[in-house]
Each structure stands twice: as structure tokens, then as C-alpha cells.
Amino acid sequence: MIDRCEGCGENATLQCPTCKKLGLPSSHFCDQACFKTNWGNHKLKHKQKAESETKTNGNFAMYPGYSYTGPLRPYPRASRRTDLPSHIGKPDYSEDGKPISEIESRGIGQIRILSTEEIEGMRVAGRLGREVLDVAAKMVQVGVTCQDIDDAVFEACVERECYPSPLNYRGFPKSCCTSVNEVICHGIPDTRPLEDGDILNIDITVYKNGFHGDLNETFLVGTVDESGRKLVEASYESLRRAIEQVKPGAKYRDIGGVIQKYINSCGFSVVRSYCGHGINQLFHTAPSVPHYAKNKAIGIMKPGHCFTIEPMINEVFGEIICGRMTGPLLLLTGRGRHSLNTRYW
């Protein structure tokens, strides 16, 4: 059977890739010029398909035509909070989203050795960050939305006179990251209710007296299946083993080998696209701390260094998907399977 062009009726040689992804009947065109000419009418099919799915599952069609890797879908989000009291100290990116001091430090590569006073500043930020994370943790249950958790995080930061570091960092619209199931990291809180069996990572950073305190934790919502629980346990154990390597004179590049060896033995895989990082007066800085073996990280640990170890572990081996959805970079497993992120600093 000869395929006919949807635009002019001539013999077709091209097929619309979006129709194929959306599971629509095949649409064919004779050439690129004809496809472009008829695009205005043709794309209505994609929109109608997205609207049909929305009516069926009740979800919000925020990104019509987007090829999702798993069953998770975005829900509506509240606008960015701007009601932070003026007396609370703010990082340089709070207004325009640009971390200028961080950008200017790029390329230097030198790992700062913090003074006794600076280390104490980090401890204060870390303790307050832990308090805020505990507030978020108490809310985790079936039916609660990540937007509810984000609101609680914002209020907990204000109560402690901290700035929620993720807020407007490179345009990020929320006070914390909430990554559910196949979302590896940078999940944006929305109004989707948590469901029984979800795995949720909450990533908190607070900015207090010029220092960032960064930490996260993963939570099981309701009854999680055995494979999901094993993933959480393996991720935590890999972090514990990595922490054992931290001492003056150790090489940053060796941490990844310890993590990957254990994770691979459990049948899981390590995300290579993101790594641990230095943290102090800057949210992200040197050193880089990869979580996989045979990396090229530079540097030797010394007293006064402050950095994160945050292995991100996937349930299956394979690709990951990076998706820019109106700004912030969202990382998804390529096969829509569970992913875990744990952190220590």
C-alpha cells in the first residue's frame, strides 16, 4: 500500500515522529516543505491527543506532546513565593536567578580551605537545614502534595530566618526539590498527591549568615514494593561506604569506585551526569565528586574542605533523559523506572 501525503495527496516518503510517539495513526508527507506548510493544521492532532489523555486520567497537560519515560505526569504548580521577609539574608541570585559569584569562580578549580569560623557557619546552616528537612519529613504520607511540602519548607525557613537556597537559583521556582519515582533529581513540587508505593526524595538547602547547608533524604510512601525498598537500601549503603573513605589525603576520584562497585553488585546503576560538589558561601563549587569509577576528578581531601557526596542510583541500567521544562533541568530515568538520590556533607 502506498502512503499518501496528508497535505497534497502525492506519494509520501516522510512520517511524523510526534504522531508515532503519541500512538496516533501514522501521518505521512511527501517532503519537508509540505510538512511545514501543513504544520498549523497537523499539530492540532497532537493537541487533541494530549487533551484526550488529560480528560481520561485527570492530569494536567503541562507539556502536550512530551514523550514521558514512565507513568509520572506533571500537575499544576503554584507561582514562585516572593513574600520572604526583607530582613532575611539572601544570596546574590535571589532577584534575577543568576549566581554571579558562583559563575565567576568557575574555572579556578581551587578547593577552598575553610577557617574555624567558616566551618562553624557551615555547621549552623547544616543544623538548620536538618530541622527544615525534619519538618518536611513529618508531612510525607499518601494524599499530601509536594506543593504542600514546599510551602511547609518555605515557612520553616522563614521561621529560622533562613533563605531556601533553591528558590530562584538559575530560575528554579520552588523552595526545595521533590523527586518522585523515576525523577532522578531537581523535581519541581506541584499539586500531584503522593500515592501509595511512591518513593520520594526531598532535597533541602538553606542559606544562613552567608553559608549554604545542603542535605536530602528519601522516603517510602505507604507500602513500597520489594524492588523499590532494595533500591533505597542499596543507595543508603553505598553512601555509608563512601563516607568511610573521607579522610585527609584521600583522593576525590576514589569515592566513585567504592560507590559503583557496590551498586553494580546489587544490580543497579549509577547516574554519571550529576555529581557531588563543594559547598560553602557558594551553593556549588569545587571540588567535583563523581559517583562512578574511573573518573577524572581532581583533588586530595584536606582539613577544612567541605563537599557533598550524593549518589544517584537507578533501578535499571541504561539511558537517562534530561528535560528542560520552562527553565530548570529535570533528570529522568530513560525507562521510567525508580531512581534514588542520597546525600552527605
Image: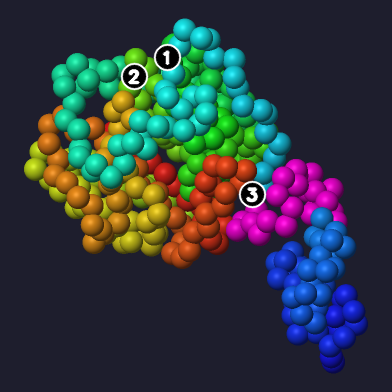
Q: Work out whether residue 287 can be spotted.
A: no
Q: Are marks 2 and 1 in contact (CB under 8 Å)?
A: yes
Q: CA gap, disc 2 to disc 1?
A: 7 Å
Element type at mark 1 = loop
- Residue corresponding to mark 3: 72
Q: CA gap, disc 2 to disc 3?
A: 37 Å
Q: In which quadrant is the C terminus drawn? A: top left
| Residue depicted at 42% across the width and 28% down the height | 205
- 187 above or below 88? below
Residue nearest the observer in this picture, 156 or 113 = 113
- 184 above or below 215? below
For discs 1 and 3, the disc positioned in front in the rendered view = 1
Callout 2, which amino acid? Gly
Query: Which disc number belongs to residue 210?
Result: 2
Point out the stretch of residues depicted in magenta. Answer: 48-71
Callout 1, which amino acid? Gly
Residue 47's image quarter? bottom right
Measuring from the top left, give residue 335's x and y in whole percent.
55, 62
Q: Local crowd at mark 1 within 10 Å, few (<14), some, or many (≥20)? A: some
| Residue depicted at 76% across the width and 80% down the height | 31
- Residue corresponding to mark 1: 89
